[in-house]
Image (tube, grey):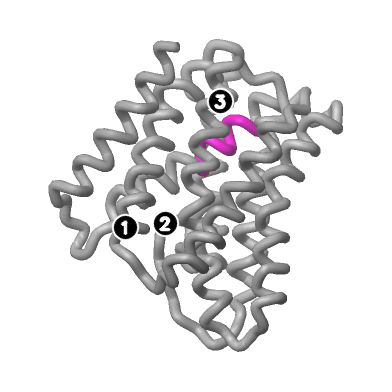
Amino acid sequence: MNLITLGLLFASVIAGAIIVEIFNIKKSKNIQLLLTFSGAYLLAVSLLHLLPELFEHNTSKHIGLYILGGFLIQILLEYFSQGIEHGHFHKSNTIPFSVLISLCLHALLEGVPLGGHLHHHAHNALLTGIVLHKMPVAIVLMTIFLQSNISKTRAYFYLLLFALMSPLGVFSGSLFADLVEFHNEIMAVVIGIFLHISTTILFESSEGHKFNSKKIFSILLGAAIAYLSLLK
């Protein structure tokens, strides 16, 4: 189990909290651009890295069902998370625990394949995609916590729980031998989750679902970086 992987997953959430504290973020267009970039990167990584590797090492005719299953699982999780994964922000004076629980389950599932036997390039691409996506999600989540009627100590405690979920997923993937046997199926579910998140981000991260120059640039940059990482 790679300690650097665990550290980056944890640090991405903490970095989001630090950004909120330093810049006193409420709802910034810069967050939407960061989400757009991460969405484009996730989509490109799924198409260029993860899907080719999945089908290269898998002979099952039913693997597509697991990808579809991951897509549907994300729809269910977003029903409870209220769309925080792609930047939807709902100001509230109370903590919506359904949001926290669904985001934790989402983060746990994302981490499991990283504990398996991914090819080096696919591992790094998946790790980068998760890190780039978790940071803006952590920013939105921490903002919600700070605007609710809870102490800052409790806010950081809840964020800590969220930060630990992906590393726990990695630990689970490397610890339990039974999970290794279902590595392809778990990877397919995560790809389905990524496909839903990335496409939703790209179409919903701007007002009126319109593409402006900054958003187009963010999309092209995310896709280009994902492609360049394939050439290494």
Q: Earlier in the sequence, mark 3 or mark 2?
A: 2
Q: Are marks 1 and 2 in contact (CB under 8 Å)?
A: no
* Separation (CA) of disc 3 from disc 2: 22 Å
Circle 1 crowding by C-alpha within 10 Å: few under 14, some 14–19, many from 20:
few
Q: Is residue 49 left or right of residue 80?
A: left
Residue 86, relative to residue 213: is it above or below?
below
Q: Quadrant of the C terminus?
A: top left
Residue 178 lies, in percent from the top left, at 84, 29
**Residue bearing the label numbered 1:** 30
List x then y, in percent, for residue 110.
62, 41
Amino acid, disc 3: Asn
Task: Mark 3 or mark 1: name the one nearer the start of the chain.
Answer: 1
Viewer-proximal residue, 210 or 21?
Answer: 21
Say above or below: 114 vs 38.
Answer: above
Task: Give how far apart the Cα atoms at labels 3 and 1 are.
Answer: 25 Å
Q: Left or right: 168 with respect to 123?
A: right
- Name the amino acid, label 2: His
* Badge nearest the viewer, 3 or 2: 3
Measuring 16% from the left and 50% from the top, which residue is drawn there? 211
SS state under label 3:
helix
Quadrant showing the N terminus = top right
According to the image, label 2 marks what residue? Answer: 86
The numbered dot on residue 124 is 3
Report the amino acid beneath label 1.
Answer: Asn
Q: Secondary structure at mark 2?
A: helix
